Image: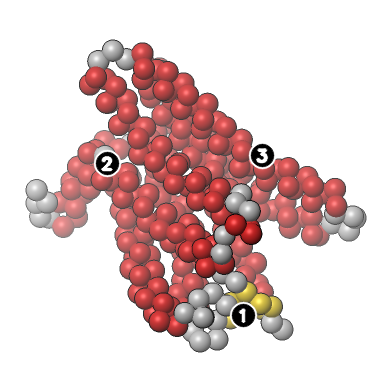
């Protein structure tokens, strides 16, 4: 969103020049946020309650859902307030808090998607050693590393601002670190999927290839949406896109993507759909068939 600084914070311009669009956006974004909350909460719940989903894949998926739920909740409520409130203001502290949380969660998701690609690699390329390689202690360590990496990404800019020495060199270090935080996880994902592709091509039966593809297809689609949006937002030259285009891309990244992820994993995954039915039957006491 566009913003101008005020004496105690910021005045958000946003979609003020489209008053009718603001009302439509408010209703649409509210509906998408409710779907995001419901979908991601359902995946977290079913991953915990359904014994058949107590596997590394669904352990990491529950962390991804928690990330999407947290990211959406850190941005969308304030966005809804700004669409409804004619003054459209946010305090300096609130703006910085939202920025730090968004940076931390976005960085964490980069690493978590790389971890999930490694899980797919082991499942497809080393199936006989899967339970040995992806043991619970390693899964918890990888998830903790992803969250801590996100926290470190947030703390570095703060420490640079608090430093009493010249910050030119430190800011250059921050730029390099930020590139590594984005490029390194993507490189790990590409390496994992290059090995997966080679393994799939060596499978002779069509049924075996379909099974291997189903194992990774949902994660690959989520990775594609995540990185294509980031690349479009941050790597496209600013002069090549309009301000309104940038606003709608930001809306897609903050509102639509967290809602799409649970849909991708449920609509394309029979295990999750079956587990959801069983949990609903237990909770509601009715048959969902």
Residue tagged 1: 11
Q: Does 56 appear above or below 164?
A: above
Residue tagged 2: 268
Counting from the top left corner in percent of width and height, residue 4 is at 66, 77
Pick the front one: 142 or 122: 122
CA–CA distance between discs 3 and 1?
Answer: 33 Å
Pick the front one: 123 or 18: 18
Q: Residue at x 9, y 48 (%)?
A: 289
Counting from the top left corner in percent of width and height, residue 77 is at 46, 71
Q: Residue 180 — which label?
A: 3
Q: Residue at x 36, y 13 (%)?
A: 202
Q: Earlier in the sequence, mark 3 or mark 2?
A: 3
Outermost residue, bottom direction? 86
Counting from the top left corner in percent of width and height, residue 121 is at 43, 25
- Mark 1, Cα crowd under 10 Å, few <14 / some 14-19 / many 20+, is some
Pick the front one: 141 or 115: 115
Q: Earlier in the sequence, mark 3 or mark 1?
A: 1
Outermost residue, front direction? 240
Counting from the top left corner in percent of width and height, residue 215 is at 33, 30
Q: Earlier in the sequence, mark 2 or mark 1?
A: 1
**Tags 2 and 1 touching, CB below 8 Å:** no
CA–CA distance between discs 2 and 1?
Answer: 42 Å
Q: Is residue 256 visible?
A: yes
């Amino acid at each position: 969103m566009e913003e101008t600084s005020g004496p105690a914070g910021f005045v958000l311009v946003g979609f003020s020049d489209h008053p009718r669009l603001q009302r439509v956006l408010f209703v649409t974004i509210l509906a998408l946020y409710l779907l995001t909350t419901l979908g991601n909460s359902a995946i977290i719940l079913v991953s915990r309650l359904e014994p058949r989903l107590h596997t590394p894949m669904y352990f990491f998926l529950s962390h991804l859902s928690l990330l999407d739920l947290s990211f959406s909740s850190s941005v969308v409520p304030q966005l809804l307030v700004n669409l409804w409130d004619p003054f459209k203001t946010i305090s300096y502290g609130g703006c910085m808090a939202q920025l730090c949380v968004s940076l931390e969660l976005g960085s964490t998701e980069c690493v978590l998607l790389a971890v999930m690609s490694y899980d797919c690699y082991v499942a497809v390329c080393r199936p006989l050693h899967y339970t040995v390689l992806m043991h619970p202690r390693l899964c918890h360590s990888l998830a903790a590393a992803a969250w801590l990496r996100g926290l470190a990404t947030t703390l570095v800019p703060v420490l640079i601002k608090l430093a009493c020495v010249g910050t030119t060199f430190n800011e250059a270090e921050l730029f390099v670190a930020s590139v590594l935080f984005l490029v390194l996880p993507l490189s790990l994902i590409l390496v994992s999927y290059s090995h997966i592709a080679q393994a799939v091509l060596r499978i002779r039966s069509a049924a075996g290839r379909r099974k291997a593809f189903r194992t990774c297809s949902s994660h690959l689609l989520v990775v594609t949406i995540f990185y294509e949006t980031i690349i479009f937002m941050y790597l496209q030259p600013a002069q090549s896109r309009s301000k309104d285009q940038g606003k709608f891309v930001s809306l897609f990244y903050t509102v639509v993507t967290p809602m799409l992820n649970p849909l991708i994993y449920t609509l394309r995954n029979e295990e999750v759909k079956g587990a959801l039915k069983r949990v609903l039957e237990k909770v509601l006491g009715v048959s969902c068939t």
